[in-house]
Image (cartoon, rainbow, N blue to C red):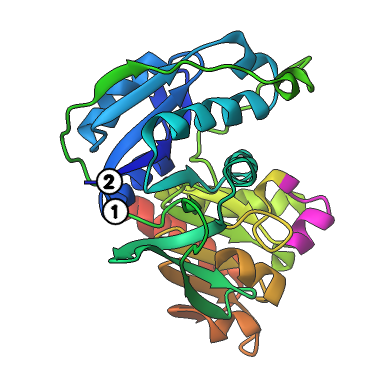
Amino acid sequence: MAEVLVYVDHVDGAVRKPTLELLTLARRIGDPVAVALGAGAADTVATLAEHGAVKVLTADAPEFADYLVVPKVDALQAAYDSVSPAAVLVPSSAEGKEIAARLAVRIGSGLITDAIDLTADDQGPVATQSVFAAAYTTKSRITKGTPVITVKPNSAPVEPAAAAGAVEELAVTFGEAATGTKVVARTPRESTGRPELTEAAIVVSGGRGVNGAENFAIIEALADSLGAAVGASRAAVDAGWYPHSNQVGQTGKSVSPQLYIASGISGAIQHRAGMQTSKTIVAVNKDAEAPIFDLVDYGIVGDLFQVVPQLTEAIKARKG
């Protein structure tokens, strides 16, 4: 069976959920070969093997931490040259998409970004995408070279499937461009204790209807009762009520959770583009004509300041 390279997104050996989803998708095409780079790469092996990696290529060098993405592209290209895979899968983060694009240029292959599903037929991988502000769903295949595909988080289930997980050290030669841009400082982001927005199974978002930064406490309380991430519309972010890092939409982050709750969000096309692929969508808005109601699975016409706290209390009561 053909081998499929899977780029591993991990933090000091802790494998992030989108990588485990990629391993599920990779098994539809061939035998997953994981590429783990940087500090803690060796600590990823057990988890990757539990989720289907037949082989794990590891490499650690100061360049992976001290410089931007080019050293990682050098390593992924070395893995590509070693394996000659049927496809290369990369998590669809900002860094992941840059790595994938640079690799595709180097190996002369086509690139598909932000896939939401992946299947295969006798001609190779077929990627499903949600395009044009999520107004259309397309199926595409790459016709030149080895397919390089980035996949959005929450696009596939995490399905354990024990495999050999044979470890091989990857020999990497860094090019001149690898050290062209040096990281001179890092500032840890303050943890809220909530899930990462793009990876969360549940997202609770607030918009213009929240009517102030202080009122986002209502949104946060609902999110915390559900173990959810907090999002915000562009209107709320532009007003300075919530950080841009939490913005959902065309100019923010794209999310695809199992459950998306929109409170006080009208449903402008820019926002819909970032959340329309959510599996179940619930909206709370006092305007019965708000465009968001054209999209939802469940809609509540009402004042969010009454509805959301009641919902939070009901969830807490059910848990308690």
Q: Is residue 199 above or below residue 205?
A: above
Q: Amino acid at mark 2?
A: Ala
Q: Which residue is mark 1?
A: 29
Q: Residue at x 64, y 73 (%)?
A: 133
Residue lying at the far bottom in this picture: please name it. 289
Magenta part of the protein: which range?
Answer: 234-244
* Residue 150: % across, % down: 51, 51
Q: Is residue 43 above or below residue 24?
A: above
Q: Secondary structure at mark 2?
A: loop
Crowding at dot 1, Cα within 10 Å, few <14 / some 14-19 / many 20+, comes out as many
Q: Which residue is mark 2?
A: 2
Front residue of 115/88: it is: 88
Q: Amino acid at mark 1?
A: Ile
Is 240 magenta? The answer is yes
* Residue 127: % across, % down: 43, 64
Front residue of 185/179: it is: 179
Q: Residue at x 75, y 61 (%)?
A: 234
Q: Residue at x 70, y 19 (%)?
A: 67
Q: Is residue 255 visible?
A: no
* Residue 242: % across, % down: 73, 48
Q: Is residue 123 above or below residue 159?
A: below
